[in-house]
Amino acid sequence: MKKRILALLMAMVMVFAMTACGKGEDDGLIKVGIINNDPNESGYRTANDADMKKMFTEENGYDASFAYSLKNDEQIVAAQKFIQDGVDYLLLSAADVAGWDSVLKEAQEAGVQVILFDRTIDADPSLYVASIVSDMAKEGQTAVDWLKSQNLAEANIIHLQGVMGSAAQVGRSGALDAEVAANANWNLVTQQTAEWSAEKAQQIVQSVIDAGTKFNVIYAENDDMAKGAVAALDKAGISHGVGKDVVIMGFDCNKWALQELLNKNWNYDGQCNPFQAGYIDEIIKKLEKGETITEKTIIMDEKGFDANTITE
């Protein structure tokens, strides 16, 4: 009887010990909390989220949790929860460039290492170990330089902005705003946020058409908004693309958008590379080995595509 009781007690101790160890310690997985924008935001974001989910799996040595929001305050709450849950790494694509210092200090104090991806933030670089991002300001400048090279006698521009305050919006808007201010022949017919939405973009362009306002350029800060803008033009019977009435400019280089360039229905598309998970994985592996990260900021290699020169 005593032997049976002793055996039962030993079994209970073993079960308790296994439970107390927790998943990360028990199976050696690296625990990561990934905060991203809504995957339905755009084709770019869908590809970005899929890339992250493909990389951060148990098979690749990770215990990954995901949180999504287009709102900064909701992302910050998610970050605080991940810190409380004891993640090893916090991977962040911020909805807004501002407001991150406090929670990143919390992460640092808790021993959680932060890696930015896709978007920059306005925070002290000491609060994160690495940043794998697009140069949004350069993306905007490349697009604006391309539009200048078209030598239009006058550019009357419908400017469709992304979510205000996001790094993509700030960078892509900044270059255009600067050129409009410097060039008397460039005019903003309207400048509104469509929040990355094709439907909202279509409504904005439709309202300009209904008002009878003259325009010949649509500068949309992502492909989905360009798509919505084109839907409004098609409905009104307004031609667009190479040699047509309206110049169409988008960003992100979704496959379907590049096909629009090949078909010469659009004029320009600025590349934004969504595939950052592999870079992050390499950085985490180095950190796990105790290596120093010498290249703190990795800028994705990107360019712009012209419908007149793009090939299959």
Image (tube, rainbow, N blue to C red):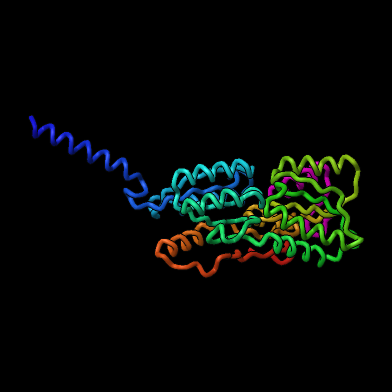
The one nearer the camera, 28 or 45, is: 28
The one nearer the camera, 233 or 210, is: 210
Could you tell me residue 180's position as x and y percent? 85, 59
Q: Is the N terminus in the top left, top right, bottom left or bottom right quadrant?
A: top left
Could you tell me residue 99's position as x and y percent? 65, 49
Tell me which secondary structure the magenta stretch mostly adopts. Answer: helix
Residue at 81% x, 67% y is 149
Residue 231 part of the magenta segment: yes
Residue 156 part of the magenta segment: no
Residue at 73% x, 57% y is 172
Residue at 72% x, 54% y is 170
Residue furthest out toward the front: 109
* Span shown in magenta: 223-245
Q: Is the C terminus in the top left, top right, bottom left or bottom right quadrant?
A: bottom right
Q: In the picture provided, is 253 more to the left or to the right than 202? A: left
Q: In which quarter of the image is residue 247?
A: bottom right
Question: Could one spot residue 200 in this view of the protein?
Answer: yes
Could you tell me residue 294's position as x and y percent? 52, 70
Could you tell me residue 301's position as x and y percent? 61, 66
Residue at 8% x, 34% y is 3
**Relative height, residue 17 to residue 111 (above, below):** above
User: How many numbered marks appear?
Assistant: 0
Residue furthest out toward the top: 1
Question: Could one spot residue 259 in this view of the protein?
Answer: no
Q: Quadrant of residue 219?
A: bottom right
Q: In the picture provided, is 27 more to the left or to the right than 305? A: left
